[in-house]
Image: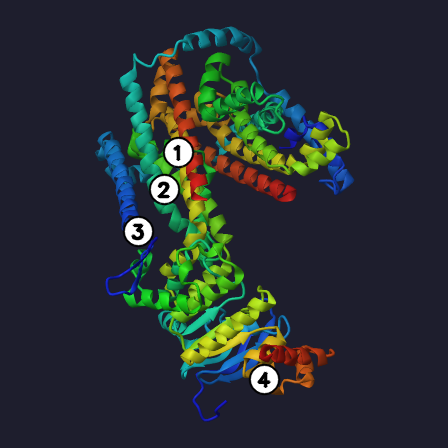
Amino acid sequence: MTPDARPLLALRGLTKRYPTGDLALDGVDLEVPPGQVMALIGPSGAGKSTLIRCVNRLVEPSAGEVRLDGEDLTRLGRGALRRARRRMGMIFQEYALVERLSVMENVLSGRLGYTGFWAAWFRRFPRRDVVEAFRLLDRVGLAHMADKRADALSGGQRQRVGIVRALMQDPALLLVDEPTASLDPKTSRQIMRLLVELCEERGLAAIVNIHDVALAQEFARRIVGLRQGRIVFDGPAETLDAAALTRIYGEEDWSRTIRRAEAAEEEELA
Amino acid sequence: MAVSTAPDGTPLWRRRTPRGDLLVWLGWLCGVALAVACFQFISDRTIWMFVWDAPQQGADLVGRMFPPRWEYAHQLWKPLWDTVNMATLGTALAVVIGVPLAFLAAHNTTPSVVLVRPVALIVIVASRSINSLIWALVLVIILGPGELAGILAIALRSIGFIAKLLYEAIEEIDPTQVEALTATGASGAQVLTWGIVPQVMPAFAGITVFRWDINIREATVLGLVGAGGIGMQLEASINTLAWPQVTVIFALILATVLVSEWVSARVRHHII
Amino acid sequence: MSATAAPFDAVAAARAWRPPPLIATRWLRWAIYLGALLYAVLGVATVEVNWARAAEGLERGARFLAGFLPPDFLTKREDILEGLLESVTMTVVSTAIGIALSVPVALGASRNLAPLPIYLFCRAIIAISRTFQEVIIAIVFVAMVGFGPLAGMLTLAFATIGFMAKLLAEDIEDIERAQAEAVRATGAGWFSWIAWGVLPQVKPRLIGLSAYRLDINFRESAVLGLVGAGGIGDTLNTAFDRYEFDTAAAILLIIIAIVLACEYASGWLRRWVQ
């Protein structure tokens, strides 16, 4: 973290209260500098998902500011909000591909924010978008699948298509919601590694919601812990210790969780 | 298929091949041309002069329909009761005939695939193809005007409906449950009542209530051809141009249909 | 429906073994059985049947059937052809218009897409269109635009809107939200969002329903003629009025044949779309 760098994303007093009365976020302050991959951990219902959805306003925040490059997203009108959304790629837990469309169509749907309705309707995307789509599909090893329907793919493949779709937006920030929740352990690690590599290649910042603490420690440089809508931990991955985990998740024997992360790292090196 | 390479080596992507694109466009063109041609045909048989003053006619009609003659409603309770009766008894009759028919028509319960099933299917198709209003038309000629013709018309149309949906449900049952019962040494009739009937019971109830709901609507118009119910009052009121009475009839039909829809939704919700 | 349960003791008995019983409260159960019985008795008792007239029915029916045979396709072939063409054209145009209009109504009638006022408005359209039997709507349209196939076409188009919009809206309300949300997150505009996030999910249903409705519209077009709204029903009604039962039989056979053909075609189309 370079404290002098202007933050890419800054949340100020972000609060979300659902109509049911549940307070999902309670005055969250958070800054993410450009190019930083940040893991957001916390128990189920802590507000992780709400937080990243408040950033691109898939969920409307009740109070507070969301500044992307200094621009307050909470005040934007519909058109301006759509333009702002193009700069924030989102990756979903259950992949959220449009299953009846082909892989290529799903990838190109990342360009919808830049393409007029009729051009998109007739699938007439600019040449460079198509070239970029092929380049990215090739990068994640799925170029040969371009014409397969999305529901014919395996979980890991679908998530890679989901990543490519988000990258097609040419974003500055990735919002990643539990990318590995429906994947097996090996695929989970592959997907996380791919994500981190791609972020490094393109200098992208990312907020990654994840509930696997070991994965978070391994792949993210910075970890933020959320509990009941408040940030209770914020620091480099190495400083996440048993005391911090207790603050985030509550009392539990954490020694094995932390050791497992270290063991996994050794295994990786071996 | 839709991926190709441009001369300069960059990859290209289209949703379809050029041939596929052409076919889709041609398909749309044919569809639109057909619709336009059909409209042209209708237009030739239309006196457009009458159509242009349709808004005025409509306004005129509404003007004649209001205020409704509410006291006329007192003469409508009996026809309304008859209408509901026609729908209910017709549905009941259709169930009595349609259920055995369904078991005869379903692949897995029919006594004979070669002999019985085709006959059952023909009965179902004949019943389904003809609208209950046409059935009523025929039956009024045979039996004379009245509710009996209406009940039979409703039943004749509903037999095919109930039997078709029910035999499809029977064909989709879980065969392992039937196997398990057969393995206990149960007789054919026992397998039927223990293994198959419980499985299709929710579908059966849903179908029956659904058809009853439709039949209420149908029963409201059967009177137009003389088969009893509130449709006869409608016919009479229209023929005498008593539009304020027509309004009352419409309102009553609206209320009845809404109630029947509510009842059927509740029952289906309760069962499924 | 209560009366329909009555003739079904064997099935009701089979249900008694399945826990839990359909109606848990004992007195309510008996009250419903009793009510059903009472209704059945009352309902049957109040049916006024002219038994003397009905008794003639068998003989009349036999004569009637004899009149049906052999079906006469030829004597009135021009009238039949004209009626058929009217029915077919009515069906095609009304289905096309009905589908085109039902899509926006369906979008408006989906609670997950539309704001409350639009939702209520579209639901009201659906309710009106579905409440009245086609024949009643046809009466109103005939009064407005005069006799002929145009009234029939308008009727069927109107009925199509309610039918399609209701079923399509149900499907739209059942879409996977995540897929639609993902498309929204790319910054897509509203129309692109519908076209990419919602439409692909409901397209098979849309095509299946359209084929089904085409089928229904043809069947209905065969009865609208009874109130003067054109189509083969007009020809059929005339044939009955003139006691030309052999021609009527021919028309009925033609209707059955076309309905069967439609049904096979739409069944095939729906399987192909899946």
> What type is the residue that disc 3 sits on?
Thr
Q: Position of A268 compared to B184: left or right?
A: left
Mark 3 or mark 2, whichever is nearer to me:
3
> Which residue position is annotated with label 2?
C98
Please tell me which residue is depicted at 52% across the width and 19% down the height of the picture. B149
Residue under mark 2: which chain is it in? C
> What type is the residue that disc 2 sits on?
Gly
Q: Where is residue A197 in the image (x, y as percent from the top left)?
A: 47, 77
Let me know if marks 3 and 2 both belong to one chain: no
| Closer to us: A102 or A226 | A102
Q: SS for tag 4?
A: helix
Cα distance in 3D space between marks 3 and 1: 35 Å
Residue under mark 4: which chain is it in? A
The mark found on residue C217 in the picture is 1
Cα distance in 3D space between marks 3 and 4: 50 Å
Q: Position of residue A44 (x, y in %)?
A: 63, 70
> Which residue position is annotated with label 3?
B17
Residue C261 visible in image: yes
> Which residue position is annotated with label 4?
A237
Disc 3 + disc 4, Cβ < 8 Å: no
Upstream in sequence: badge 2 or badge 1 = 2
Q: SS for tag 2?
A: helix
Residue under mark 1: which chain is it in? C
Disc 2 + disc 1, Cβ < 8 Å: yes
Disc 3 + disc 1, Cβ < 8 Å: no
Label 3, residues with CA under 10 Å away: few <14, some 14-19, many ≥20: some
Cα distance in 3D space between marks 2 and 1: 10 Å
Residue C79 picture quarter: top left
Let me know if marks 2 and 1 both belong to one chain: yes
Q: Where B137 falls versus B17 (above or below)?
A: above
